[in-house]
Amino acid sequence: MAGDRHPRSEPSSGMDRERVPGARCRGLERVVRLKRGSLDRKAMNKALSVLKQGGVLGIYPEGGIWNPGHMRAQVGVSWLSHKTQAPVVPISFSGFQMILSKIFKLKRPHIKMRIGKPIPALNIQDEEQTIKEVYQEYADMVLEQIRALVDPQDFLLIPDHTEYSLQVLVEKNDKIIETVEINGSDALAQFLFTPIIIDALAVNLKKPVQTLYPKEQPRWNKQFSDALQEVIDVLSEFPGFLTYRLGMGQGQQAATAVREVLQLLETVSESDQIVLIDANAHSTYLDGRIEDKSYQYRILPDPR
């Protein structure tokens, strides 16, 4: 988004530029951090100030990148454009999905950036529509134009649809003695298989939740319980932390499941029982590929 200070060269539709991740961006002066999942008026007012002073502001219309291709546009871009009459320049990035694989093969990764034609600032003319409807329409249009610039091959690299499932079992003496019904178990599986959400807890918020990552590591009852309690504490401070990222229904169900698993761990904490959490994800892709992921969290009794 651009204020009164226009870019030196006006971008045209289909302009391609390749950049290596980590390259410096000239003119990038600061980052406006916001608390996702809540109305962060302070951050939005800072962004508003940047535009009113003639600055340029970069923003993800969908509010993040944790579920690329499947996220709905948020109305923040509309509000900022309307309040400042700043045009919106759609920019897409292609190649993110291949970065890690190329790095592991010691190959230089490249990101392709495509810049579209500026979209005129939001000017409300239809008085029959509510402001909410107008803002959503404009935000949807911006996101649609950005997606039109993305390399179609990128959409083949991300799942078109994913089904999640999760089962909780209690084991004693190498025998399954109980299957525990957990409300919102499927949503909990989605949470656990979305590393960028756990990253937000572990890296951004500095919470000790590394045990939640679906990778091989020893796990103890108190350690896992403490991690789940950290999630609950974050939800107390930022109620929209999960609903913003997973959607209202899934986010609420995931929060319920976290609390129920924590309650189960507290119940078995004084025994020698082991809690098993079997998480599964079944993904289908636009080219017909199918991918299945599964991981078992084996939570042991605390050492005595």
Image (cartoon, grey):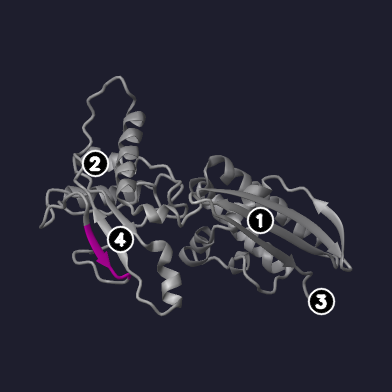
Q: Mark 1 sits on what residue?
A: 280
Q: Quadrant of residue 298?
A: bottom right
User: Which numbered disc, 1 or 2, marks the residue closer to the eye?
Assistant: 1
Point out which mark residue 304 bears: 3
Q: Residue furthest front?
A: 288
Point out which mark residue 81 bears: 2
Nearer-N-terminus badge (1/2):
2
Residue ID at (63%, 68%): 211
Label 4 environment density (alpha carbons within 10 Å; few <14, some 14–19, many ≥20): few
> In the rendering, at what x and y percent does residue 151 appear?
34, 54
Residue type pointed to by label 2:
Ser
Q: Is residue 218 above or below residue 84?
A: below
Nearer-N-terminus badge (2/3):
2
Q: Residue furthest bottom?
A: 106
62 or 82: nearer the eye? 62
Residue type pointed to by label 3:
Arg
Q: How far, Cα to Cα, is label 3 from label 4? A: 47 Å
Q: Secondary structure at mark 3?
A: loop
Magenta residues: mostly which secondary structure?
A: strand
